Each structure stands twice: as C-alpha cells, then as structure tokens.
Image (tube, coloured by chain):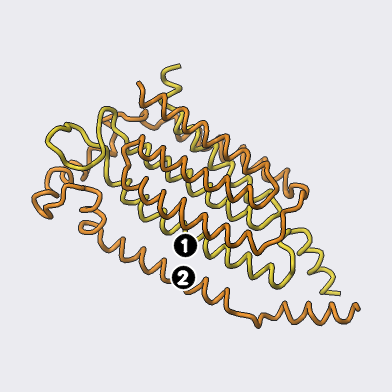
C-alpha cells in the first residue's frame, strides 16, 4: 500500500511539472523544469523496481540532456510571450487521441498484477536460466548484453549517426538561406 | 477508489502523452518543441516500466531472499530507448541552433513572415 501511495504522489508531481513547462515562456526556466522532470522520472523508476533504468535516466536523461539544453539555451535569445498557434486543431487532436487511449487502457491489467500476460512468456526462463549461463546475478544486464546483444549494437549505430548529424549541423556555415538573408538585409539598408 | 489508484499510472500516461503533443503543436518557440518531444517520449517510458511492475516483487537482481521479481524485459527496452531519446533531442537542439544562426529568431511566426518577405 505504501508503494502505491508514493507512486501516486510522484506521478502527480510529474503532471504538475508538465503543466508548468507548458505555461512558462522563459527558456532557462523551461530547461530547469525539464531537469526536475527527468529527476522525478528516475525516482518513479526506483519505486517501480527498475533500478537500472533509474540509473540511466539519472545519468543520461537528467545529466547529459540537461547540460546540452543549458548550452543551447545560453546561445539562444530569451523566449517571447507569443500567442499559441494551431490551437483549435490541436485541441481536436488531443481529445481524439485521449478517447482512443482511454478505450485501450480500460482493457489493460491493473498495476502490479502478477498474472498479466506480459509476465508469463519468455521472462520466467530468463529469470531461471540466465544465472547458470552467464554467472551474473543482474538479469537486466544478461538480457541487454547477451540475449539481445544485437539490439544494443543497433543502438550504438543510432547514437553514432546522431553524433555525426550534430557535428555536421554545428560546423556547417555555408547554407543558402544565410547568404540570401544577408544580401536582403544589405539591400534594405 | 482503490481501483483508481491502480489505474493512475495509465491515466498519467494519457495526460503526459497528450500534453507533450500539445506543447509540440501549439508553442511557437522551437526549444520548447524539443522539450515537448522529450515529454512525449518519457510518457511511453513510464508506461512501459509500470507495466513491468509486480506487486511484492523486487528489482530483477537474483538473490536467495526474494521470491518474486519484476519483469526485466521492458527495462531493457526502455534502457535502449532513453539513450536514443537523448540522441534525438541533441540532434533537435543542433537544428534549433542552426535555425537561429540563419534567421536570428526561433519563433515560428517570425520565421514565416521572414520567409514571405524574402519571396517577394
């Protein structure tokens, strides 16, 4: 029962943080709230028994991501109090998506049900066998590095591609738009 | 009332997902759009991890004391997805910086008006 109450409290805090991210216009406050958001997420993961995920979220999501956002926000101008755009279509979209998801979620098993279908297939074997095969007590590590090692290899390729993209974007100075606008501005003067 | 507290994670998943989408579509600032994308992803992460929970279970590290473990498979999938999500937002931030270099603003309507002016 304690677990459920803590979970309720943390998830409610997450929703409140999301609302304030939506409301704030100052960029540096948005970045700070995002850091708080990811840290709350890692607390939720610890409470839900996902310690490895919490560790990764605290290091990568809350650490590196927040640092990148602070570095970007330092170079960008202060956010303006502009009007919201596309308000009417987005409200229709939001209502439609929530209705579809509510219909789906009504049929899901309750939180923590030990007889849910997700717990009955493949995973019992992983929990039973993996220690004899790999001699590591942490099952998450066994699955990540051995049973599904190719997934992790694919993830590495994705990160490499993203890093290449970031470097290519940040070092390129010769885009067409820039020269066009410089010329236009000179013409205006 | 007791059922509601069990369903709260699923409800929060809907609210977070729709809220992330709403921020992406309605806000004019491009950095806020990147943050909205991160919220959208986090909604899916929290949903997956709460599906993996078993009541009275512990973290999936094998010991002699525990008799029930939470499901390790969604944890592995989310572990991969978190790192890919950070790579995505880094690429998005690089795009935003490049847009600022070219247009000297990151508000959507201002860029639109600049584009219209340059077409004439």
Q: Is residue B38 above or below residue B117?
A: above
* Figure colour of chain B: yellow
| Location of residue A78 in the rendering, given as x and y in whole percent from the top left corner | 72, 56
Query: Could you tell me which residue is drawn at 81 percent across and 82 percent down?
Result: A183
Query: Could you tell me which residue is drawn at 43 percent across and 59 percent down?
Result: B84
Q: Nearer the viewer, residue A75 or B23?
A: A75
| Location of residue B15 in the rendering, given as x and y in whole percent from the top left corner | 55, 36
Q: Residue extending furthest right?
A: A189
Q: Nearer the viewer, residue A29 or B120?
A: A29
Q: Which mark is residue A163?
A: 2
* Same subunit, tags 2 and 1: no
Q: Report crowding for label 2: few under 14, some 14 to 19, many 20 or more residues within 10 A (C-alpha).
A: some
Cα separation, mark 2 vs mark 1, equals: 7 Å
* Discs 2, 1 touching: Cβ within 8 Å: yes
Find disc 1 in the rendering and name its residue.
B87
Q: Quadrant of residue B116?
A: bottom right
Q: Report crowding for label 1: few under 14, some 14 to 19, many 20 or more residues within 10 A (C-alpha).
A: many
Identify the element where label 2 is drawn.
helix
Q: Is residue A123 above or below residue A143?
A: above
Chain letter of the residue carrying label 1 = B
* Figure colour of chain A: orange
**A150 sits to left or right of A95:** left
The N terminus of chain A is located in which quarter? Answer: top left
**B66 sits to left or right of A1:** left
**B110 sits to left or right of A141:** right
Query: Could you tell me which residue is drawn at 69 percent across and 49 percent down?
Result: A26
């Amino acid at each position: 029962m304690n677990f459920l109450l803590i979970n309720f409290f943390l998830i409610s805090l997450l929703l409140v943080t999301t609302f304030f991210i939506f409301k704030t216009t100052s960029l540096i406050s948005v970045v700070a709230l995002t850091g708080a958001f990811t840290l709350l997420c890692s607390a939720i993961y610890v409470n839900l028994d996902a310690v490895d995920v919490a560790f990764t979220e605290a290091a990568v999501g809350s650490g590196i991501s927040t640092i990148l956002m602070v570095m970007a926000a330092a170079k960008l101008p202060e956010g303006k109090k502009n009007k919201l755009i596309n308000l009417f279509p987005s409200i229709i979209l939001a209502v439609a998506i929530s209705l579809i998801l509510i219909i789906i979620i009504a049929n899901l098993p309750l939180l923590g049900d030990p007889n849910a279908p997700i717990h009955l297939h493949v995973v019992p074997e992983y929990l039973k066998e993996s220690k004899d095969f790999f001699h590591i007590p942490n099952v998450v590590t066994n699955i990540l590095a051995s049973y599904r090692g190719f997934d992790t290899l694919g993830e590495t390729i994705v990160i490499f591609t993203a890093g290449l993209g970031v470097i290519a974007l940040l070092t390129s100075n010769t885009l067409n738009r820039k020269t066009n606008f410089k010329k236009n501005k000179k013409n205006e003067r | 009332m007791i059922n509601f507290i069990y369903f709260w994670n699923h409800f929060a998943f809907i609210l977070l997902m729709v809220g992330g989408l709403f921020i992406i579509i309605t806000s004019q600032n491009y950095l806020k759009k990147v943050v909205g994308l991160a919220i959208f992803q986090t909604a899916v992460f929290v949903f997956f991890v709460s599906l993996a929970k078993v009541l009275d279970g512990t973290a999936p590290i094998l010991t002699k004391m525990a008799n029930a473990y939470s499901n390790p498979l969604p944890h592995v999938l989310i572990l991969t997805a978190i790192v890919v999500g950070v790579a995505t937002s880094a690429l998005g931030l690089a795009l935003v910086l490049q847009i600022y270099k070219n247009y000297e603003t990151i508000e959507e309507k201002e860029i639109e008006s600049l584009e219209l002016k340059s077409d004439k």
